[in-house]
Every structure is written in structure tokens, then in C-alpha cells.
Amino acid sequence: MDGNILIINGTILTMAEPQADLLVDGFILIKDNRIAAIGSMADLPDNARDRGPAQLIDAVNSLVMPGLINTHTHAAMTLFRGLADDLPLMNWLNDYIFPAEAAHVNPEMVFWCTKLTAAEMIRSGTTTCADGYFHEAAAAEAFLESGLRAVAAQGVIDFPAPGVADPTKNIATAANFIKSWQDRSDRIIPAVFAHAPYTCSAATLQGAKELAREHGVPFFIHVAETREEGRQMQELHKTTPVHYLDSLGVLDRDTVCVHCIWLDREDIELLAKSGAGVATCVASNMKLGAGIAPITEMIASGITVSLGTDSCASNNRLDLFHEMGLCAKLHKVHHHDPTVLPARQALQMATINGAAVLGLADKIGSLSPGKCADIIIVDLEQPHLVPFYNPDLLVYAANGGDVVSAIINGRLVMHERRILTFDVKEAMARVRKLSRPFQ
């Protein structure tokens, strides 16, 4: 449903000032795709309800907050959810995922699997995602139809890939994708995803980054995900993955480095100096046994760190509430210190930090007049959320199933747990059909 929306009687968490108190019994007025006003119900103009908002939402006993931002996923890999669990990363990739992709990834698969992913993310409170895969035009179409906001990145790799049989055409394919999507929708931002330093040559990495700079779009890359990757970089280039990327000139404020687990102090300093953002994927890293990223050290050095889920193939679910809780608790036990990575910091990673990493901090990630209306409503009438003293409980007790409504770019995309933009059952049926060869 489009048009003006008035949310009333809600407890509002703006994230504009993370340490500020909650606004209890507040309202948000949305006009077109922007937040027009936020305030206490006592300050709501008497005639606000009489102006005929297209939708009036009573958020009594609910929390109104910014939509969550997932800064790294591969949406189409929903098809491979649970296909090859409990394996080391390289075995998982080389023995299962790469062969499955070669045989089954096509535009139809990418479209329907991305739609299913969009449903899962919307229903768990994510309103923006950063996606990287092949046949990304099909993914962008799915995101557009679903109502989700997305940074959609075409994959670049120096091997034959779905939709790019000739690796010498990998950058040209990405260029065509960017040109066809750059001005098509204000919700879909095209981007470039170079798989990793060990799957892309120096020339490919530099060419992909040059393409991203030329069009002013983000550049994503997996970096230092495993100990083996570090050893390989030492053997081939006598340096670390981060130093290697820095030597190629691909690290800057528009680069998003994903994982960043095996970093030394100099790596962290280089990342901080470059201005590159980091997307950490805690559950995926844990499940693959990849390691624990030095998040607290990166944050202390001034690096903006955000949260991603990675794909369903390496995480199995896309719930950023779950990711926040894992992130906060993992680092406490890792450092043997319960004060490390407090809940509010994890909440920032999933909201305002995610927006900053994607270059969208002026549009999303917090609630204030003039920003895009990307908002979720969390039902506080749940036993595990009573009493609700402060937002820390979102990190330690909430889950995606507590989200009842989602507004993206001023449009009501989900209300009372029902997605309004597309037929979720159709998407599930299509993905089940696509999964039959694996059964």
C-alpha cells in the first residue's frame, strides 16, 4: 500500500542517538517515501488522523525501529540450504557448492530463490540487503518485485561461472548489469562483487574496482575468511590478503570487505586508513569453523563494522536478530569479558553501521525526519519480551518472528506477518520444484 502512513501509540527507537532513551507513546508520520515527523502522541496534531492517511497503524505494545540491514548475502543460494552441512569451507565450495552452481544456477533459479530469500528477510525484520551472485539481473528483478531495498552486486570470478562462460567477459558482464540497473529504481543499487583474492587475478580485481569507481557503486570482496587463504597469499604474494588488496589500490571508502577473520594489527590499521567497511558474518563463520573476526579491535581502530548473514547455504537462516545475539555473546566469551561488544553496539552494527558501510547513512539506518521510511514494528506482547526495559533485550531475546510489520521506502510491505507485495507460497513452491534434483 502506497501513500501516507501514520503510526501511533508506539514505543520508538530511532537509533539516531543510540544512547538516548526510548520515546514511549510516540507517533511517526510518513509521506510518500519519507519520514515527515516523529514525536510524542501528546504532540500529534489534532487533525493528523483526519487528513486521510492511506494507512493508520496502531503500534500499541509494540516497538517501532529502523529496518535491519544485512550487508552480505548470496540470496539465490537459498536453493542450497542444508545441502552440504558440517564441512570445511574449501571442501564445501569445491566439492558441493561450485558443482551445484555449475549445474543448476540460471536466471529462473536466481529469480525464485531470491524471492524466497526476500520473504525470509522481510519477515525477520530486514529491509535492506547487500547481495552478490551471478545472473544478478534476475536477483534485482526479484528484489524489485518483493519491495525490499537491495544493493545487488554482479559476481566477478576468473573461472567459468553461471551466465559468464568466458571468464574474460566477467567485467564486461558486470558493466552491462550496472548500466541496465543504475537508474531503474531508487531501491535497487547495482554494484560489483569480486569473489576473493584467490579466485580473481590482480588484473581482474583492479578492473572490477575501476568499473565500480567509474559508476560510483560499491565494491564487495571476501577477504581473509580462512587461515588457508592467508597461507596461500603468503606463498603467492609474500603478504597478507589485506596488504595485497591495498597494493592493488582497491581498498577505499566504497569497498566492503566481507569476513575479515584472519587479520593482524597491520591489516587492521590498513583497513582503517583506507576507509573500507567490513561485513562480518558471525553464524556462517562459526558454522564453517572459519574463526572469530577481531571485531572489537576493528571497531577500536575506527573501522565501521556491520552484520551480514552470508547465504542460507552456510548459515541456514537469515535472521539478523539471531546474528546480533550471536555476535555479542561470542565476543564476550572469546575475550572472557562480559562488557565486550555490548548489545547496543550489536544493534548499531545491524542498523546505522550497515547503512554507513553501504554508503546509505544519509537515507536509512535510523529514524529521523527526511530519511527514507524503512521501518519495522516489533510485537512486545510476547512472553520473552516482557518486561521491556531497554533495547538490549532485542539483541538477547528477540527473534525475527517478533516482527509484525515492515515499511520499506514508505510502502507497507508486510502487515500482521503477511507479506503484501508477492505470493510467498508461490515462491516456496517454485523453490521446492527447483530442489528436486538434490533429493
Image: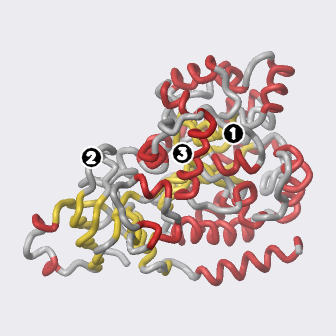
Residue nearer the viewer, 329 or 95: 329
Residue 60's place in the image compared with 323, above or below, is below
Name the residue that disc number 1 marks. Answer: 222
- What type is the residue that disc 2 sits on? Ala
Mark 2 or mark 3, which has the lower sequence index?
2
Residue at the spot 50% in from the left edge and 55% down from the top edge: 396
Report whether 254 appears left or right of 161: left
Dots 2, 1 in contact, CB < 8 A: no
Report whether 257 appears left or right of 91: left
Residue 208's place in the image compared with 239, above or below, is below
Residue at the spot 33% in from the left edge and 45% down from the top edge: 18
- What type is the residue that disc 1 sits on? His
Name the residue that disc number 2 marks. Answer: 20
Question: Could you give the CA–CA distance between mark 3 and mark 1, rounded to whole angstroms?
Answer: 22 Å
Return the x and y of residue 119 as percentages of the image width and height. 57, 71
Return the x and y of residue 75 as percentages of the image width and height. 66, 60
Residue at the spot 56% in from the left edge and 19% down from the top edge: 269
Residue 279 location, quadrant: top right
Q: Nearer the viewer, mark 2 or mark 1?
A: 2
Mark 3 or mark 1, which has the lower sequence index?
1
Residue neighbourhood size for the residue with mark 2, other residues' Cα within 10 Å, grouped as few (<14), some (14–19), many (≥20): few
**Residue reaching furthest right?**
95
Residue at the spot 81% in from the left edge and 20% down from the top edge: 234
Dots 2, 3 in contact, CB < 8 A: no
Question: Could you give the CA–CA distance between mark 2 and mark 1, rounded to whole angstroms?
Answer: 35 Å
SS at badge 2: loop
Question: Could you give the CA–CA distance between mark 2 and mark 3, rounded to whole angstroms?
Answer: 20 Å
